[in-house]
Image (spheres, coloured by chain):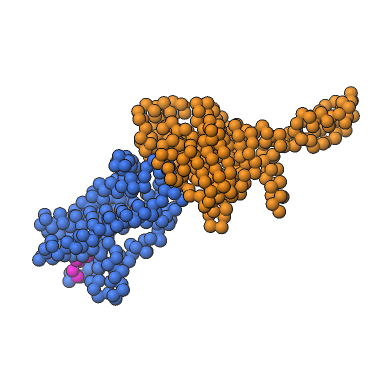
Amino acid sequence: MNAIEITNLSRKYGKILALNHMNLDVPEGTIYGIVGSNGAGKTTLIKALVGSLRPTSGFVKVLGLDPLKDKWKLRMQIGYMPQMPALYDDLSARNNILFFGKGQYVTDLKNKTDEILSFAELTSRANDKIETFSDGMKKRVSLCCALVHNPKILFLDEPTAAIDAHLKMQSWILFRKLAQSGVTIFISTHQMDEAMLCDKVTILQNGEILAVDTPGKILQRGKTKLKITVNNETKITIIDSTSGDLATELKKFGLDKNISSVELQPDNIEEIILSIMQEKERGGK
Amino acid sequence: MMNHTFIIAQRVLSQLKGDRRFLTLYIIAPLIIIYFLKLLIDTLPHFVPVVNFTLPVCAFIVHFLSFILCAILLVQERTRGTLDRMMIAGFSKTSIIGGYTLGYFGLATFQAITSLTESIWLFNLNYKTETILLLFSVIWLLAIVSVMLGIFISTFAKHEGHVLPFIPLIILPSVFLTGLFIDPGRLPFWAEIIGKCLPLHYAVNIIKEIMKPEYQVTSTFIDFGILTGYIFILLALASFTLKDTE
């Protein structure tokens, strides 16, 4: 079953088309990544899904509900972590979580808050004011606020932007734990390495979907640079990133005994996404 | 929903309590400005009826500071993203407006008491207890109206700087057109009408009436009613303009 269904969704800001006739289904229990550069339409899409933005045209269903018409019913079942921490600096981590938890009528809120603080490894800083926290810690508190009511879907808008590699890794361990417990995670990012950690990825540019696939399949869409050195002379050939293509190419050489090394340099995810975007731009011209 | 209103009011109060700069500005600043007014008045010749505008000016100071500070704090909620987050977390816009009003209610009361007490003491005003209570109720009502005005105006501002143009648009005309220094009846008709649209006009009217020896409460019923009406009108307008969907 799909947790999110998007049909022909468009949103205009004046003359700018932020989302352009978008169609997308997100299966339940997956970590679904929306990848795109700044201004691609990621935040606009998330805002439309949580019901804080009215589409210009098209329909959205989240857990089978309309985010605008059924907003109160839906908001009890979703967690939203905005791009900025959106916390009260003068309150402690615990009190921030308690405040947003009260909005969701969470039963046994105090225990849930303790549990979630422990889950995010924040227990030792629970009573410290947010103004004393680093950006990465604030993001984790923000995640706790989005999680305290056990949502069925979690919308995360660039949750690991501007945090260090260690915290990013810890955050992803958290996301994976949540997904294993059945939570659907809809995550936006402009960091291509993060896209690789999702179950499925949609590449977005100027409000349009360029590709929807698993990260592995998107990787296969890249090219591989084949460098063959024969008698100290190096020949470079560009082939598709599949083992069959590699074999075909090597057969031309008969795997001569004089071949001293075969080195594969596949495109990384950033290069692939960049080339998909460039292809689209060329196609559009 | 009432529960949500109290939760937000509690948070606003705890934020105010923890923000010493804000508290100083909100409570101490009017007291300092009233003292500056005293210094100014002391330089005027004795035949100038200073009593006629000391308390109206005090009311204006409360009006201005309550408006500007409440508007800025609510705009900060928007720029920090907490306003959006509150709404997505299940708080309705009515409970947000109600919570803010309730949170500022106590502060507005405190500000009205301190400003009036200082004015009475500084300007040696001798009034009966009933008169002082009436003066307090006017300044207090005006403070609540100013908070509501701040909430309403904040819905048009995307950042703190957007609040500033409303000062010359709403606050400064109050200085010249509401009878703070002159009789508004002597203004051109159109200017008098503009003055009558501003809440300070009714507060100044009541204060001037109260200070008359022959004052009867019944003569200010309408002005009291209009001032109270502003609270409900601004509440309704703020509920209409505060959007939970872009």
Is residue A147 on the magenta stretch? no
Task: Give A265 or B176, whichever is nearer the viewer.
Answer: A265
Residue A255 is situated, as x and y percent measured from the top left of the image, at 87, 26
Residue at the image position 23 percent from the left and 49 percent from the top: B110
Residue A185 at least partly seen: no
In the figure, is residue A87 to the left or right of B190? Answer: right
Residue at the image position 54 percent from the left and 40 percent from the top: A5
Task: Give B188 or B5, whichever is nearer the viewer.
Answer: B5
Residue B147 is situated, as x and y percent measured from the top left of the image, at 30, 53
Residue B118: quarter of image = bottom left
Is residue B54 on the magenta stretch? yes
User: Magenta region: which residues?
Assistant: B48-55
According to the rendering, which colour does chain A have?
orange
In the figure, is residue A264 to the left or right of B234? Answer: right
Residue A25 is situated, as x and y percent measured from the top left of the image, at 57, 38
Residue at the image position 46 percent from the left and 26 percent from the top: A119
Residue at the image position 62 percent from the left and 41 percent from the top: A203
Task: Give B243 or B52, whichever is nearer the viewer.
Answer: B243
Asked if residue A63 is positioned above or below residue B131 in the image, the reply reads above
In the figure, is residue B67 to the left or right of A203? Answer: left
* Main SS of residues in magenta: helix
Residue B46: quarter of image = bottom left
* Chain blue in the figure, letter: B
Residue B234 is situated, as x and y percent measured from the top left of the image, at 31, 56
